[in-house]
Image (cartoon, rainbow, N blue to C red):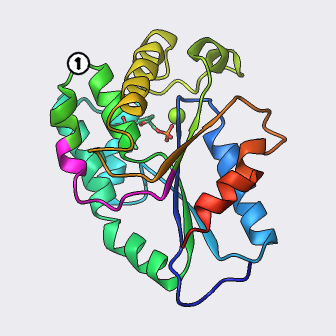
C-alpha cells in the first residue's frame, strides 16, 4: 500500500532484554518497510546524543553514580525531550521504529526495587505506541549470545529480574493504563540474519496499517 499523505506514520516499539535482538529486528523491519515504499525511521532510547543522554551514557558505562530515582527520571526526560519531534515525524507520515521505550524504563527500574506505579508516572503523556513488539527470549539464552557488552544491567541475574517485570507489564498494564498500546506482538528468538516471521505476518501488517 502506498503511503497516503493524509495518514500519519505508525509508532512501533521493540522491547526485550539486552541481546534479545531488538537492534537487528529493528533494522530488518526498517529495510522491509523501505522495500514496500513506506517512509520509516529507526530511533532508539536512550538517545545518547543529547546532554541528558550523555548523563545516561556515563551512568550506564559506570563512569558516574546516580541515585536510582534520579536515573529513572533522566531516562524519562530523555523521552520527553524527543516527544515533539516524534509527534512531528508521525504527523508528516513517517513511521517510527523505536528500539526501547517506556516499558524498558519501568521494567529496568522496577527490577531494582523501585515502586512500579512510581516508575510509570513520568511516562504518562508520552505518545502511545500503535504496536509493541516484545522479543521474548529467555534470559539464559540472551546471555549465551556472544556475551554482554559490560554495561551496567548486563548481568544474567539482573536480566532475570527485568524479565519478570516485563512479564508483569505484559500481563496487566502494557495494553492498559501505561500508554494504551493497541496490540502486543510476541516474537520468539530468531537469528540476526532473518526477520522475525511475525513481523511479516498479515496480522502484524493489518494492525500496523489500521491508519
Ligand atoms: P541499550 O543497551 O538499548 O542502549 O540500553 N534502560 C533503557 C532503562 O533502564 N530505562 C530506560 O528508560 C531505557 C530506555 C536498558 C541501555 C540500558 O538502559 C536500560 C538497557
Ligand atoms: Mg545494552
Q: Residue at x 17, y 38 (%)?
A: 70
Q: Residue at x 28, y 20 (%)?
A: 112
- Residue 27 appears in the rendering: no
Q: Residue at x 76, y 62 (%)?
A: 31
Indicate yes or no whether the magenta region holds residue 166. no
Displayed-image quarter of ligand 1: top left
**For residue 100, above or below residue 10:** above
Secondary element type, mark 1:
loop
Q: Foreground residue, 149 or 68?
A: 68
Number of marks drawn = 1
**For residue 50, above or below residue 39:** above
Seen in the image, is 134 located left or right of residue 115? right
Q: Mark 1, residues whose alpha carbon is within 10 Å: few (<14), some, or many (≥20)?
A: few
Q: Position of residue 124 (x, y in %)?
A: 22, 53
Seen in the image, is 160 located left or right of residue 124? right
- Residue highlighted by disc 1: 113
Seen in the image, is 188 located left or right of residue 165? right
Residue 188, image quadrant: top right
Magenta span dominant secondary structure: loop
Q: Which residues are magenta?
A: 121-131
Q: Position of residue 195 (x, y in %)?
A: 78, 45
Amino acid at each position: 500500500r502506498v503511503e497516503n499523505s493524509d495518514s500519519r506514520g505508525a509508532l512501533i516499539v521493540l522491547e526485550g532484554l539486552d541481546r534479545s535482538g531488538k537492534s537487528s529486528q529493528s533494522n530488518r523491519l526498517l529495510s522491509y518497510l523501505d522495500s514496500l515504499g513506506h517512509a520509516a525511521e529507526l530511533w532508539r532510547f536512550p538517545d545518547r546524543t543529547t546532554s541528558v543522554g550523555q548523563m545516561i551514557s556515563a551512568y550506564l558505562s559506570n563512569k558516574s553514580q546516580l541515585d536510582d530515582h534520579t536515573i529513572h527520571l533522566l531516562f524519562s526526560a530523555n523521552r520527553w525531550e524527543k516527544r515533539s519531534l516524534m509527534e512531528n515525524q508521525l504527523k508528516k507520515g513517517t513511521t517510527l521504529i523505536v528500539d526501547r521505550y517506556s516499558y524498558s524504563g519501568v521494567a529496568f527500574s522496577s527490577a531494582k526495587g523501585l515502586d512500579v506505579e512510581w516508575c510509570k508516572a513520568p511516562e504518562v503523556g508520552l505518545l502511545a505506541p500503535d504496536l509493541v513488539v516484545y522479543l521474548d527470549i529467555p534470559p539464559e539464552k540472551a546471555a549465551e549470545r556472544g556475551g554482554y557488552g559490560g554495561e551496567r544491567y548486563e548481568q544474567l541475574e539482573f536480566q532475570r529480574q527485568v524479565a519478570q517485570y516485563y512479564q508483569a507489564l505484559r500481563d496487566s498494564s502494557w495494553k492498559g493504563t501505561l500508554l494504551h498500546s493497541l496490540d502486543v506482538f510476541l516474537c520468539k528468538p530468531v537469528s540476526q540474519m532473518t526477520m522475525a516471521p511475525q513481523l511479516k505476518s498479515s496480522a502484524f501488517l493489518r494492525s500496523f496499517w489500521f491508519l
